[in-house]
Amino acid sequence: MDRRIFLKTSGLALVSGALLPNVFVRMAQAGTTKGKKVLVAIFQRGAVDGLNMIVPYAEKAYYDARRSIAIPRPGNEAGALDLDGFFGLHPSMASLLPHFKDHSAAFVHAVGSPHSSRSHFDAQDFMECGTPGVKSTQDGFLARAIGPRKGRSPLRAVAVSTTLPRILSGSADALAIANVSQFGISGAGEMASSFESMYGGDAFEASKILKSANPAKLQPQNGAAYPNNPLGSSLKQIAQLIKSDVGLEVAFADVGGWDTHAGQGGTQGQLANNLRNFSDSIAAFAKDLGSRMADVVLVTTSEFGRTVRENGNRGTDHGHATAMVVLGGGVKGGKVYGQWPGLSSSQLYEGRDLAVTTDFRDVFGELLTKQLGVASLATVFPRYDSAASKWRGILG
């Protein structure tokens, strides 16, 4: 967090010191990776409550606004897991704490879209297109970032989904694959021709590559155990694609259940269960890939956050800013990034929400440039200057 804002709002001292080397980089130095950089994006659809995800426990206003759903301060029963003396991690996300401590994971707070929409549909569309407030954009910003295939692998951009999400729609020829072990056809001749004409040459070529590589045969490694939930399944399949060396560059998955208007719960309940499944899936993915995580960066996002004050149903309504997770090789972790705006009444967006102080495009702009080598962001985020001066320095 911004040093001046932190000291002013918390009254706590900062502990300085050199960051430890990213654990995945150390693992890669001791092992072997293929060197193909991969970006994995996870969309938390429904607007996750970033305030209960990354808890500003040093702010009294947080507890004043959330009498029944606030996460207790560290040191209390079922309290937040301390991160830096100001923020704590929801206890259900304990599986990610070791990654924060070994500096392979970081969080970004008070992040989101500058557009004020509280419509799930509009906000998701604006975010996936990368053009907040502009409804005429037809393609997704990840598709624009990687551009046309031009001879590269037909499996370079994959969404683990039954349909192609907006974020990957466009000229990138991305594929939606619900199940890597069942994609394509098992026959030949007329069946093969029918599949190719229906789904196109890229899909047909991809199915042949998958059939040859057979990624489903690659079971989780390093003792990783994926939770039995949709995100766990998606990340397991993405890990299989990475380990199969089929040319994957960008992978996408989404997970719902974050629209907690009623019965949200605090340390236990609806949100806690979702955060546990979410975190355990990500932790299993990192453990499965092991040293290969040196070439992988995983990032999470959500269309917006939740209101600071809980509502009459012990839930939260549609808000503004939220929090993101970034994990992987090259991540300068062990830190909560962003400028904290505060939670007093005068600091809230429209008098009710956590204010956005980091545009999501600046986070993705840095990741796309440093991880995937995107030369220019001018077409990725049109009408927006995602200059390096606005990046948070999340990747080395």
Image (tube, rainbow, N blue to C red):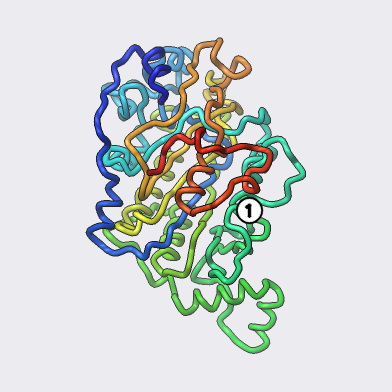
- Residue at far right of view: 136
User: Where, quadrant-wise, is the C terminus in this rendering?
Assistant: top left
User: Where, quadrant-wise, is the N terminus in this rendering?
Assistant: top left
Q: Amino acid at mark 1?
A: Arg
Q: Quadrant of residue 87?
A: top left
- Residue 71 coordinates in the image, percent (x, y): 39, 24
Number of residue marks: 1
Residue visible at 25% across and 40% down in the picture: 20
**223 vs 367: above or below:** below
In the image, 174 versus 217, the foreground residue is: 174
- Residue 373 coordinates in the image, percent (x, y): 49, 53
Q: Quadrant of residue 29?
A: bottom left
Residue visible at 55% across and 61% down in the picture: 157
**Residue 270 visible in the displayed image:** no
In the image, 131 versus 161, the foreground residue is: 131
In the image, 249 versus 308, the foreground residue is: 249
Residue visible at 27% across and 48% down in the picture: 23
**272 vs 290: above or below:** above
**318 vs 274: above or below:** above
- Residue at far left of view: 30
- Residue 160 coordinates in the image, percent (x, y): 54, 59
- Residue 287 coordinates in the image, percent (x, y): 31, 54
46 left or right of 325?
Answer: right
Residue visible at 39% across and 66% down in the picture: 243
208 left or right of 350?
Answer: left
SS state under label 1: helix
**Residue 247 visible in the displayed image:** yes
Instruction: Determine crowd level at label 1: few under 14, some 14-19, many 20+ residues with C-alpha closer than 10 A.
Output: many
For disc 1, the marked residue is: 144
Q: Quadrant of residue 184?
A: bottom right
- Residue at far bottom of view: 189
